[in-house]
Amino acid sequence: MPESLPFTISEYSQGAFKDRDILAIREVPLTIRLNGREVVTLLCTGKHPEFLAVGFLKSDALLTRADQIVSVKIDDQGERILAEVQVSHDPWDGLTMERTITSGCGKGTNFGRNVATISQRRLTSDLKVRPDQILALVAELRERSTLYRATRGCHNSTLCTPDTMLIFREDIGRHNAIDMIVGQCLLEGIDTRDKMIVSTGRVASEILLKVARIGVPVLASVAVATAFSASLARTVGLTLVGNVTTDSFWVYHDTGRIQGLGS
């Protein structure tokens, strides 16, 4: 299925209406079922549904390791996608399933428990990054964002080293873009403890929790962070950078990973 669909709209400009052909980003529901039980329906572009489904379940702590996954089956029906995930353990053992509507209108299932468990962790990576590398990665992220330029309707995220982009993902939701990276790293055995994530989306607490859960020590975004996410970054020792422009950025928390800061 295409990532975007053509539409003819009426555009008001300079005091008059005229027809204009545009591309509107695709939005399709992806329903995730885990061991036969429906967990959530995400609205997404439909790209990489296996990574998105596994990444969401990993981010929500319903699975923790790749060897727990028995199978992932995707049924793309065009107007709806079904992801059937089978795991070898009981993912709900001892859990009370809550429902949290996130700041990005996503639905989390175990937000309170995730905050409590991740707050007990401490990221100890020795990763170092220079300010010019942060600026260069954000510039490359913008350059790669062809779907955004075509539709103005998506967010973009990338897993990278300070020098190289490794995985680039885009979706209508910033949560989805992060979860696709989480899922791909889990399924392909990619070590994330010495990597960065660079994103276009606002860094609310649920985004920071997803990044911290897979051990990524540095998160940078072109958007700002919430006070809660900045507080969580300090609690877990995650280097958090926001409001990245062409020549500046804000550092909410460092832990010595940004070269030149404090020296």
Image: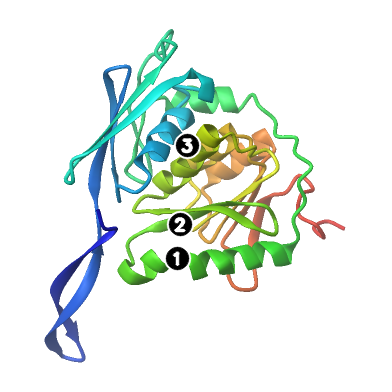
The residue that label 2 is drawn on is 156
Ranked by sequence position, the earlier of labels 2 and 3 is 2
Q: Amino acid at mark 3?
A: Gly
Q: Find residue 6 and report its horizontal and vertical position in percent.
A: 19, 68
Residue at the spot 40% in from the left edge and 45% down from the top edge = 176
Q: For residue 183, which numbered disc appears in the image?
A: 3
For this view, does 88 lie left or right of residue 166? left
Residue name at image x 50 percent, y 26 percent:
114
Q: Earlier in the sequence, mark 1 or mark 3?
A: 1
Query: According to the image, label 1 marks what residue?
Result: 145
Quarter of the image for residue 163 reads bottom right
- Please name the amino acid that badge 1 sits on: Ser
Estimate how packed mark 2 is, as few (under 14), some (14 to 19) or many (20 or more) residues with alpha carbons within 10 Å: many
Kind of residue indicated by mark 2: Asn
Q: How is the image coloured?
A: rainbow
* In this picture, residue 126 sits left or right of residue 206: right
Secondary element at tag 1: loop
At which x and y percent is residue 42? Answer: 29, 39
Q: Residues within 10 Å of mark 1 (few under 14, many from 20)?
A: some
Q: Report x, y in % for residue 262.
A: 83, 56
